[in-house]
Amino acid sequence: MNISVETFSGYKADEYPLTFTVDGRKFSVISIDDRWYSSDSSYFRVFADDANTYILKQIPGNNEWQIVTPEN
């Protein structure tokens, strides 16, 4: 799955996602419902303009983003 993310950069670069594109389809982030960190990544649970919730994973340093599928 090919994903690209446009971010807001405030006091630091790539502070949070504004839009993301998956396989050529662009989604706008309506709200960020949660945000958390691991030792090597940042996670954002976002509500998008298609009325779905997504978890976006950012791996800092190499500008890599992924969509995370929650484990059942």
Image (cartoon, rainbow, N blue to C red):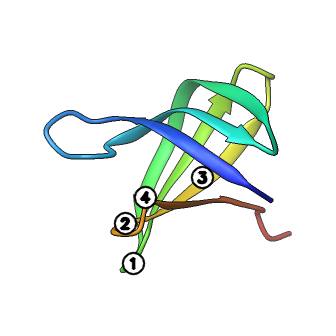
* Identity of the residue drawn at 27% across and 36% down: 9
Task: For marks 4 and 1, give the CA distance.
Answer: 11 Å
Residue receiving disc 1: 40
Q: Residue furthest front?
A: 24
Kind of residue at badge 2: Pro
Front label number (4 vs 1): 1
Query: Residues at badges 3 and 1 in contact (C-beta under 8 Å)?
Result: no
Task: Specify few, some or many for label 2: CA neighbours under 10 Å numbering under 14, 14-19, or 20 or more.
Answer: few
Q: Nearer the viewer, mark 2 or mark 3?
A: 2
Residue 23, compared with residue 67, is above or below; it is: above
Name the side, left or right, on which 45 lies relative to 24: left
**Residue 48 at x, y = what percent?**
68, 27
The circle on residue 56 is 3
Q: Distance between the residues labelled 3 and 1?
A: 14 Å
Tell me, for residue 36, which label it has, or none: 4
Residue 13 lies, with reference to residue 65, above or below; the image says above
Number of other residues with Cα within 10 Å of mark 4, as a class: few under 14, some 14 to 19, many 20 or more: few
Give the position of the N terminus as an image quadrant: bottom right
**CB atoms at circles 1 and 2 under 8 Å apart?**
yes
**Coordinates of residue 37 in the picture (x, y in percent):** 39, 65
Q: Position of residue 31 (x, y in %)?
A: 54, 25
SS for callout 1 = loop
| Amino acid at dot 4 | Trp
Which residue, given by chain and number where applicable, does mark 2 sit on? 60
Earlier in the chain: of badge 3 and badge 1, it is: 1
- Closest to the camera, between mark 2 and mark 4, is 2
